[in-house]
Image (cartoon, rainbow, N blue to C red):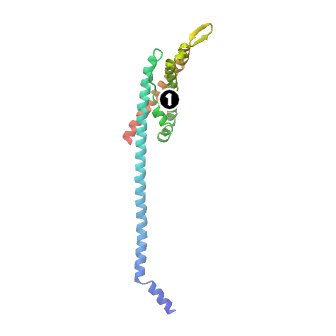
């Protein structure tokens, strides 16, 4: 029994207690400090992520404002000319196509995103119809053909062109209306993102 008591006493000597107290102090101080440092790192990462998302949102809004303004000006100009001359240019769908899904991730306004999709649809219709009018203008075979409407014979080009003008006019009006709705919202969002970002 004496050996056991001596063995226990030698195990729990002064060195053991110094190491034990040091370890406990290290745990008591080290764990909260490590948690505090981790929390600071997480906050810094979240702040950086918010800044990056804000920058992406601002870039998206500025690009949309630029291209929608371009298309709005193009449509206003084309609206006055398209019945008299063949328009060689066309609307720009690049940004609207490229950001078709991205806007749902970055913009918080679902209704705005739906309007942008509607705008994209109508601009696509305008693009297709203007492209068709241009192709028809340069297609020699369509100028030779005749269409009989009732008892009257009409050149095929004139008839088909007339069939495209009314829907095109409707799309122009719709596009301009949507542009008038979304541009102020997008500009306001871009300005707020610059100030708040």
Horizontal and vertical percent for residue 124? 51, 28
Name the side, left or right, on which 152 lies relative to 124: right
| Residue found 46% across the figure and 33% down from its top | 94
Residue 173 seen in this snapshot: no
Please, which residue is most extreme toward the top here? 151
| Residue found 37% across the figure and 39% down from its top | 194
Residue 152 seen in this snapshot: yes
Please, which residue is most extreme toward the bottom here? 2
Decide which of 135, 6 is in the foreground and name it. Answer: 135
Residue identified by numbered label 1: 119
Horizontal and vertical percent for residue 103? 48, 38
| Residue found 62% across the figure and 7% down from its top | 151
Horizontal and vertical percent for residue 179? 46, 27
Task: Specify few, some or many for label 1: CA neighbours under 10 Å numbering under 14, 14-19, or 20 or more.
Answer: many
Decide which of 169, 187 is in the foreground and name it. Answer: 169
Please, which residue is most extreme toward the left here? 195
Locate the C terminus by quadrant.
Answer: top left
| Residue found 41% across the figure and 53% down from its top | 43
Establish if 18 lies above or below 81: below
Mark 1: which secondary structure? helix
Horizontal and vertical percent for residue 133? 51, 20
**Number of callouts:** 1
Query: What is the quadrant of residue 157 in the picture?
Result: top right
């Amino acid at each position: 029994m004496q050996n056991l008591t001596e063995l226990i006493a030698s195990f729990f000597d002064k060195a053991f207690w110094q190491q034990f107290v040091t370890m406990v102090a290290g745990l008591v101080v080290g764990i909260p400090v490590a948690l505090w440092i981790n929390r600071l790192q997480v906050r810094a990462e979240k702040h950086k992520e918010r800044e990056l998302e804000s920058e992406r949102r601002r870039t998206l809004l500025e690009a949309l404002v630029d291209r929608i303004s371009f298309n709005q000006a193009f449509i206003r100009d084309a609206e006055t000319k398209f019945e008299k001359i063949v328009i060689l240019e066309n609307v720009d769908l690049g940004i609207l196509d490229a950001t078709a899904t991205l806007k749902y991730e970055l913009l918080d306004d679902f209704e705005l995103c739906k309007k942008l999709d509607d705008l994209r649809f109508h601009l696509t219709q305008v693009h297709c119809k203007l492209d068709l009018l241009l192709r028809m203008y340069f297609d020699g075979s369509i100028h030779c053909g005749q269409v009989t409407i009732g008892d009257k014979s009409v050149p095929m080009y004139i008839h088909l062109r007339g069939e495209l003008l009314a829907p095109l006019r409707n799309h122009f009006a719709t596009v301009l209306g949507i542009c008038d709705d979304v541009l102020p919202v997008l500009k306001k969002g871009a300005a707020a993102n610059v100030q708040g970002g």
